[in-house]
Image: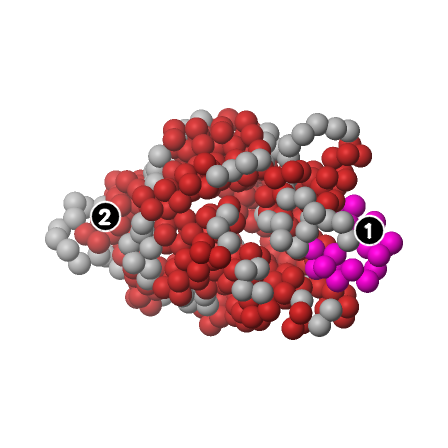
Amino acid sequence: MALGLTATSVASGAGGDAERSERAGRALTADVPIEQLGVGELAQGTTALQQHLKAQPRDATGWATLGAAYIEQARTSGDPTRYPQAETAFGRSLKLRAADENDAALAGQAALAAARHDFETALGLADRALRVNPYNERALSSRVDALVELGLYDEALEAVELADQRRPGLPVFTRYAYVLELRGDVKGARRVLLRALASAFSTADVAYAATSLGHLSWSQGQFSQALEHFATALRADPEHLPALEGRGRAHAALGERERAVSDLEEVVRRYPLPGQLAALAELYEVGGQRRQAAEQYALIRTWIRLAHANGVATDLETSLIEADHGNAAEALKSARAEWTRRESVHTADALAWALHANGKDREALAYARKATAGSPGYRNASFLFHRGMIERALDDDGAAHRHLRAALDLNPGFSPTGARDAASALSALTRPRGDS
C-alpha cells in the first residue's frame, strides 16, 4: 500500500483537485495525526482511501486508518453516525491482522472509545496498543486523554511526559499543555504551545497550535492576545473552525456582540456540537433573542439523542443543558450517572450545579469544592462561578463574594449568561465579612 507522505505534505504545494486528493489520500497513514488535516483534505483523503480499499480490501492498515478518519470526521462535523462506521472499519482490520500485531486498529479503537466517552475502555485499549508498539502516537495520545477525563491527573502527567519522550509532536504538545493547565501551570502550558507553534511546518499545524494558544489566553481573560492567536490561525487556514469559534468567543468577551454572533453562527452551521451551540444560544439570550436561543438549546438536545443512539455516553452534556435550561431532575440523574464513571473536576462541577438546580446546595457545595480544588492549582472561571452561586444560596455571603469575584477577575467573558449572573449576584451581596 503506497501511503507514504506525512500530514505536512497535504497542506503545502500547488496543484489541481485531483492532485490534492491524491496527496490527501497518501497522507492518511496509520501514523499521521489526522486531527491536523483540514476538513477538505480529510474528506478527500477519506474518499481516496475508501476507493483504495475497494480495490485492496485485505489492507488491514488501510481499514484502521479509515476508522481513524471516520472518528475525526465525526469530531469536525458533529456527526456521531460516523462512529459505527469507524467501529466496523476497525473490526475489518482486526479480522485481517490479529490484535497482537495490529497496534493501529487497537489505537483506533481506543480513540473511538474516548470519543464515545468510555474512558475506562479507552485506557485499556491504549495500553494494549502500546504493548504491541510503544511508540504508537495515537495510542499515547488516547492514553493521556483517558487519564485526564478519568480525573487521574498525576498519572496523566506521567503519561504525557512519556509520550513527549517517545513521540514529540503537535498532538502530544497540545495534550502536554492541557495537562499542565489542569495542574495550574499556565506559564508552562504556554511555553509548550509556543514550542508547538515554533515546530509547526504546515499551515494546518500552525492553525492547530495557534488556536490552542488562543484558547489558553481566552481562559485567562487575555482576550486581545487571544484574538491575535486566532488571527494567526485563520491566516494559516481560513477554514479552521476551532479558530473561528475562539475568535467569536473572544469578540463576545470584549462586548463585540455582532462580530461574535457572526462567527458563531458560521461555526454552528458547519459544526453543530453542544459547546458551540450553547455559546451561540447564550449570546442570543443576553441579546433578548429568546426564540433563537431556544432553537439552539433544542438542537443540543437533538444532538444528544443522536449521539446516544450512536454509542456516545452523553450524561455530562445532558446534565449541563438540563441544569440551566430544562429538567433539573434529569440533570441530576445524568450527573450522578457520569460521576460513577469518572471523578474529574468537570464531572464534579456538573454534579454540583445539578444538585444546586434541585435545591440540594449543602451536598452541592462538597462537589463544587472538589471541582475548584480537585486538581492542584487549576482555576476555571465557570467552576468558581458555580461555587459562588451555591455559597450564595447557602447564605455564605463572604465566600460567595470571594468566588464570584474570582470568576470575573480570572475571565470576565467566561460565559455571556454566567458573567451577567455573576455580576448581578455580586451587586446584590453584602460586603464579605471574613473567611468562611
Question: In the image, what residue occupies the spot 36% across and 50% down?
Answer: 181
Question: In the image, what residue occupies the spot 70% across and 27% down?
Answer: 14
Q: Which residues are magenta?
A: 45-65
List the residue tagged with mark 2.
Answer: 401
On the image, which quarter does residue 412 sit in? top left
Which label's residue is closer to the chain start, 2 or 1? 1
Tell me which amino acid carries mark 2: His
| Residue 85 in the figure: left or right of residue 157 | right
The mark found on residue 52 in the picture is 1
Tell me which amino acid carries mark 1: His
Question: In the rendering, at what x and y percent does residue 357 appear?
Answer: 41, 59
Question: In the image, what residue occupies the spot 77% across and 40% down?
Answer: 22
Q: Is residue 49 magenta?
A: yes
Depth order, front residue of 184/191: 191
Binning the other alpha carbons within 10 Å of mark 1 as few (below 14), some (14 to 19) or many (20 upward) gives some
Question: In the image, what residue occupies the spot 55% across and 36% down?
Answer: 201
Question: In the rendering, at what x and y percent does residue 344 appear?
Answer: 41, 63
